[in-house]
């Protein structure tokens, strides 16, 4: 394979084997999902046969990659993308016995408690995970001492008030970007719950340039984002990863889904003589 082909990088040796047409044809977001999956997996201890939830898997590229490269069993779960289409992709990749496509909202997952050895999310977690209650709901599905980990686009450091002028037009135009944060913010957000111990919270040193390269390949017409990335040069924009373990003895609250019905008829108004 020529070094001039797209998506070849010494940082991601496993990903280099995957055909650029397959990578582009399965694109579902603002990142090369198998690059981020390989980067995240490099700090995980994935063993053959482990149960892994790939939360917000998009077109299941990351799920296929994890199954092929680490021999784990992956539940490829997404709300927006068709599980039937993902099943075709999974079959074509020859991993039908190890990757299982699921259609589900991240806030209403259909799994048993303590089922997964690892829960990972590739460039999706900020869409649903900033809620203060979310980690409690998600952690129930990880085994005690199981891994919860994510890699996603974000900031090198928090932008608290004044948005840098070179980013302002793009951030204002895209409301979903308001959920992006720095790795240090995610560490704080997870650790304050007392549910997990965060082991890794860092940024990809050349994340901005990799993001820019990806966007030039999948959405060259997206000039607003391209201009923001080019102007930023890595000052604020990057890819972040966070890895934590569920504390084995922590008590997790069951989510409240309904209030038991109990109506007692009482007088509406006071009666005065």
Image (cartoon, grey):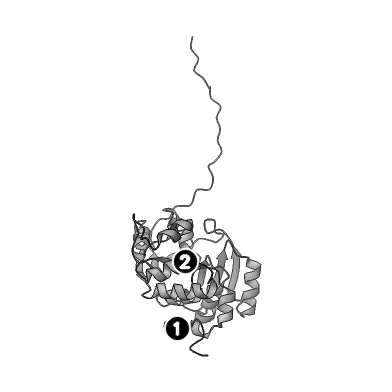
Image point 49% across, 17% down: which residue? 270
Query: Where on the picture, by quarter, is residue 11?
Result: bottom left
Image point 53% across, 48% down: which residue? 257
- Residue marked by disc 1: 9
> Is residue 188 in view?
yes
Which of pointers 2 and 1 lies earlier in the amino acid sequence?
1
Image point 41% across, 78% down: which residue? 42
Give x and y (percent) for residue 184. Answer: 33, 64
Give x and y (percent) for residue 112. Answer: 53, 61
Give x and y (percent) for residue 63. Answer: 54, 73
Image point 64% across, 77% down: which residue? 91
Viewer-side label of 2, 1: 2
CA distance for labels 2 and 1: 23 Å
Residue 76 numbered tag: none
- Residue marked by disc 2: 225
Question: Is label 1 in a helix, a strand or a loop?
Answer: loop
Query: Where on the picture, by quarter, is residue 169?
Result: bottom left
């Amino acid at each position: 394979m020529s070094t001039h082909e797209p998506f070849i990088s010494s940082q991601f040796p496993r990903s280099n084997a995957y055909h650029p047409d397959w990578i582009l044809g399965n694109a579902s977001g603002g990142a090369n999902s198998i690059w981020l999956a390989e980067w995240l997996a490099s700090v995980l201890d994935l063993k053959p046969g482990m149960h892994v939830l790939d939360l917000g898997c998009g077109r299941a590229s990351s799920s296929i990659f994890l199954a092929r490269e680490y021999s784990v069993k992956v539940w490829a779960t997404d709300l927006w993308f068709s599980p039937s289409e993902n099943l075709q992709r999974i079959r074509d990749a020859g991993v039908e016995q190890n990757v299982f496509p699921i259609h589900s909202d991240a806030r209403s997952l259909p799994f048993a408690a303590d089922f997964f050895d690892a829960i990972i999310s590739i460039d999706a977690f900020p869409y649903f995970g900033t809620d203060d209650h979310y980690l409690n709901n998600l952690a129930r599905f990880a085994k005690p001492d199981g891994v919860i980990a994510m890699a996603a686009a974000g900031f090198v450091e928090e932008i608290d008030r004044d948005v840098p002028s070179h980013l302002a037009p793009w951030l204002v135009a895209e409301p979903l970007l308001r959920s992006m944060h720095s790795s240090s913010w995610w560490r704080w957000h997870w650790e304050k719950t007392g549910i997990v111990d965060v082991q890794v919270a860092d940024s990809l040193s050349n994340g901005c340039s990799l993001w820019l390269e990806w966007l030039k390949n999948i959405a060259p017409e997206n000039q607003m984002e391209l201009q923001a990335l080019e102007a930023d040069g890595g000052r604020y924009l990057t890819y972040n990863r966070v890895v934590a373990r569920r504390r084995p003895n922590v008590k997790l609250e069951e989510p409240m889904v309904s209030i038991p019905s109990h109506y007692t008829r009482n007088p509406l108004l006071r009666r005065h003589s």
